[in-house]
Image (cartoon, rainbow, N blue to C red):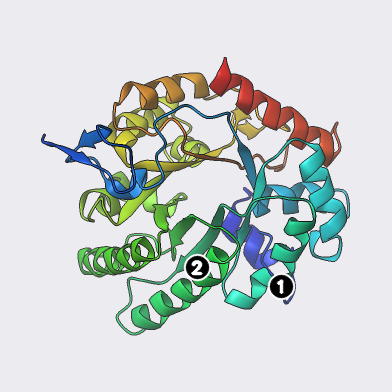
Amino acid sequence: MRQNRRNFLKSAAAVTGSAMFMTNPTALPGTPAGNTVPQAVGQAAYLYMKYERKPVEVFINSYTVGTFYAREGIDVNQNLDQCFAELKAAGLAGFEASAGQPGELDRVIDAMAKQDLKLRSIYAGANLHDAGTDAAEIKRVIAVAERAKSAGTKFVVFNPAAKGGKSDAELIRQNKNLDLLGAALREMGMNLSMHYHTSELEFAAREFHSFMCDTDPANVSLCMEVHWSYRASGNSAVSVYNHAKLYADRVSTMHLRQSQGGTWTETFVAKADIDCEKVLAILQANKGFDSNCHIVLEQAPENGTPKTLKPLEIFKQSAEAVKKMYEG
């Protein structure tokens, strides 16, 4: 069975009762005088842009942490202090938690604070395509974001509820709601960054292109989900590069994962099935791309992934590979 975050959050139960493991230039708000970007560039992707290059900080998400510890028989939820200590030892800057309710973040935030790990992003999802649930779902996500903001979160990495082949009416409703949610988050000083899996890239990627083309760039940005662009396009690296070319100026966050021969590798490496150095070069060639965008490791094991290293070494080698790719 091919693993993904949805399956993991449904079945692995990495957390129980807590956070889920699972053409005129326009100055941007808060930037130094003279620092401008093209008016067409989405402000949501650049709300936190810094114009000087900063040292690369690498984060890791709950799916990666949960799956690698699970294969060692370790329940992250029951061993937060131990696991987060290893994230810090691996040279990671912080952790992207998944949450469906505000209270699910409490224990995670406390444990992260002990290791001085940053909660710069959270992962969330909601059904925004059904008229009967959309208002309540927006309210719920905003409540989660408010709790996360208190811990310094800037990005809400968001995946819409999966439904293969959403109708045009459903996509129109979903995009309207994404604009509403994104605008609310922007007012809070936060950023809505769209994540995706296979279903959003089905049927000529109509849902993926819809939430990019039919929403306001000021409200909705993109999480460049490198390996799902690859796998959901029939293992096509060309598709990854084209997604980067199309939407570089909307990218606010990146999820990085690699595979070899179609199977996820144990550690992240820059070049294998996907040339991630090429992806980065494509993004950086677009003058609207924020070279300091938020970088999150999403490497994970699946059937066929080698098992030669313990989580600490996996995280350390992967973080070092990402830093070398960016700084090299």
**Amino acid at pointer 2:** Ala
Crowdedness near tag 1: few (<14), some (14–19) or many (≥20) residues, C-alpha within 10 Å = some
Q: Is residue 309 visible?
A: yes
Location of residue 178 in the rendering, given as x and y in whole percent from the top left corner = 31, 64
Residue 224 position by quadrant: top left
Location of residue 254 in the rendering, given as x and y in whole percent from the top left corner = 49, 40
Q: Badge 1 is on which residue?
A: 18
Of tags 2 and 1, the one toward the viewer is 2
* Sequence-first tag of 2 and 1: 1
Q: Which mark is residue 301?
A: none
**Amino acid at pointer 1:** Ser
Q: Badge 2 is on which residue?
A: 145
Residue 215 position by quadrant: bottom left
Location of residue 140 in the rendering, given as x and y in whole percent from the top left corner = 47, 78
Q: CA distance from mark 2 to mark 1?
A: 16 Å
241 above or below 110? above
Tell me: 214 left or right of 123. left
63 above or below 182? above
Q: Is residue 75 visible?
A: no
* Nearest the eye: 183 or 311: 183
328 above or below 203? above
